[in-house]
Amino acid sequence: MSKIAVITDSNAHFTTEEAREMGISVVPMPFMIGEDTFYEGITLSREEFYSKMEKGASIITSQPSPSDVMDIWDKALEAHDEVVYIPMSSGLSGSCQSARMLAEYYDGKVQVVNNQRISVTQKRSVLDAIELAAKGMTASQIREQLEFVKYESSIYIMLDTLQYLKKGGRITPAAAAVGSLLRIKPVLQIKGERLDAFSKARTLTQGKNIMINAMKHDIDTLYGGSDKDNVWLYAVHGNVPEQFEEFYQEVKAAFPGIRVQRDVLSLSIACHIGPGALAIACSKKMPNKEA
């Protein structure tokens, strides 16, 4: 049986301790803050990221350098036969396509998974890859399996402010001004490779209900129903731990048949939408998984 190394990028948000315990390697995502480059989890913590953001710093996401990616692959191949690399969705960054080009130099030993995931759903794919490797699948088989189920996940995110969408050019300044005046809380959806507008809420309560009802619809119509054997479910937030506790309890009450896990949004998402977001995410369980 081949020894498989599972590698991801820091968008999957494994802590250093979690990565060590699971035996995975993580490529840190770079962020340009002003004229300086910081690396998530190494020279940039979540606390520092949000502190700089709230102080008005200009923060831009970037791709890992080819040498950084290949160095981690090369090190993994010293002790493993093959590598499964799971980067963030190709629809949200060019880093996946860049990695696929680099993998061409490895004669099939590195398999880059493009399964359109980010944040907690990407994290779930990494955990699935570990389980599939333990069952004896090759790197190529794992990639094929993960890409086969790539559309079987959903994320709904309620923004606290339109300021950062305006900053990134995703909405016009006029639309942002009107939205702020009306206290509109947009709800976005990540399903597959796109980050799209989904709905608008006037109040926090309305926004949370929109997300919960949208997820109920997805679970019932796409993922086999609200049963612990069908889905992984997550309540997630940007940087609002106190507000999140109430939301977490509301999600638990809305889905009594499913264990709701808690997590945080990846910094790459937060960079575009700002702090203060609440989100709900779901991935369909792969066949023959234990609850």
Image (cartoon, rainbow, N blue to C red):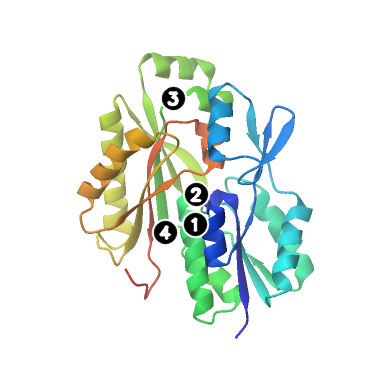
Marks 3 and 2 close (CB-CB < 8 Å): no
Residue 54: percent from the left, percent from the top? 53, 24
Q: Which amino acid, mark 4?
A: Glu
Q: Which residue is drawn at 55% across and 60% down?
A: 19
Which comes sooner in the sequence, label 3 or label 2?
A: 2
Find the distance from the CA under tag 1 to the CA under tag 4.
14 Å
Q: Residue at x 70, y 73 (%)?
A: 109
Which comes sooner in the sequence, label 1 or label 3?
A: 1
Per the image, the residue denoted by label 3 is 161
Q: How crowded is mark 2: few (under 14 residues within 10 Å), some or many (20 or more)?
A: many
185 left or right of 120 in image: left
Per the image, the residue denoted by label 4 is 152
Residue 68: percent from the left, percent from the top? 75, 54
**Viewer can see residue 148:** no
Q: Which mark lies nearer to you, 1 or 3?
A: 1
Find the distance from the CA under tag 2 to the CA under tag 4.
15 Å
Marks 1 and 2 close (CB-CB < 8 Å): yes
Find the distance from the CA under tag 3 to the CA under tag 2.
20 Å
Marks 1 and 3 close (CB-CB < 8 Å): no
Per the image, the residue denoted by label 1 is 123
Q: Which amino acid, mark 2?
A: Ser
Q: Which amino acid, mark 1?
A: Lys
Per the image, the residue denoted by label 2 is 119
Label 1 residue SS: helix
Q: Residues within 10 Å of mark 3 (few under 14, many from 20)?
A: many
8 left or right of 192 in image: right
Which comes sooner in the sequence, label 4 or label 3?
A: 4
Q: Which amino acid, mark 3?
A: Thr
- Which numbered marker is on residue 209? none
